[in-house]
């Protein structure tokens, strides 16, 4: 089985009871909300990754203010020619604050929209798992930087 490791960094930006989110577009066209962030480039520091990715996806300049923790996910999915991939995603989550820029949608990337959503509305949104993991880390602030999965 083909093994894949993806290391990514995401921002939990909460301002005035609203969460900054980007809408991810899957290969099949499905759209789900996610935290702004994304994959690290080879040799890139995760701090720099989250700053770069948030600007690309939302137009905002941010300052990471706290390392919330790390979320790890593993799943198997089908690949071409009847093979499967053993995917392991390692997601580094930062609390961040907006320091500049203007909200805008990404063009030509993996997301198509950026928006602030009221925290109480997030559970009703179609979203990816990193949103819930990030919010739990932000709310609970576990000393070990990890929350157990439900």
Image (cartoon, rainbow, N blue to C red):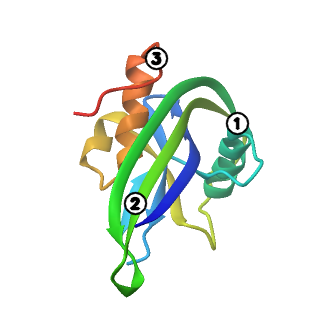
Q: Earlier in the sequence, mark 1 or mark 3?
A: 1
The one of 33 and 88 positioned closer to us in this rendering: 88
At 66% from the left and 51% from the top, the residue drawn is 40
Name the mark nearer the viewer: 2 or 1. 2
- Looking at the image, is 144 positioned above or below residue 39? above
- Looking at the image, is 66 positioned above or below residue 131? above
The residue identified by callout 2 is 86
Does residue 37 appear in this view?
no
The residue identified by callout 3 is 144
Q: Secondary structure at mark 3?
A: loop
Residue 78 locus on image (x, y percent)? 34, 73
The one of 21 and 88 positioned closer to us in this rendering: 88
Q: Find residue 109 and name its label.
A: none
At 49% from the left and 32% from the top, the residue drawn is 70
Give the Cα separation between the discs numbered 1 and 3. 19 Å
Q: Quadrant of the N terminus?
A: bottom left
At 51% from the left and 62% from the top, the residue drawn is 113
The image quarter containing residue 137 is top left
Q: Residues within 10 Å of mark 2 (few under 14, many from 20)?
A: some
Give the Cα separation between the discs numbered 2 and 3. 26 Å
Q: Find residue 47 and name its label.
A: 1
Residue 124 locus on image (x, y percent)? 24, 48
The one of 31 and 146 positioned closer to us in this rendering: 146
Q: Secondary structure at mark 2?
A: strand
């Amino acid at each position: 089985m083909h093994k894949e490791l993806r290391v990514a960094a995401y921002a939990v930006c909460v301002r005035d009871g609203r969460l900054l989110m980007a809408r991810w577009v899957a290969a099949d066209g499905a759209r789900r909300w996610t935290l702004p962030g994304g994959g690290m480039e080879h040799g890139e520091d995760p701090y720099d990754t989250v700053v770069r990715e948030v600007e690309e996806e939302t137009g905002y300049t941010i300052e990471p203010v706290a390392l919330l923790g790390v979320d790890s996910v593993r799943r198997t999915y089908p690949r071409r020619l009847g093979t499967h991939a053993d995917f392991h995603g390692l997601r580094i989550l930062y609390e961040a604050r907006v320091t500049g820029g203007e909200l805008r949608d990404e063009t030509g990337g993996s997301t198509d929209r950026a928006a602030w959503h009221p925290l109480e509305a997030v559970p009703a949104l179609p979203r990816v798992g990193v949103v819930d993991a990030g919010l739990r880390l932000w709310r609970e602030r576990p000393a070990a930087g990890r929350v157990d999965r439900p």
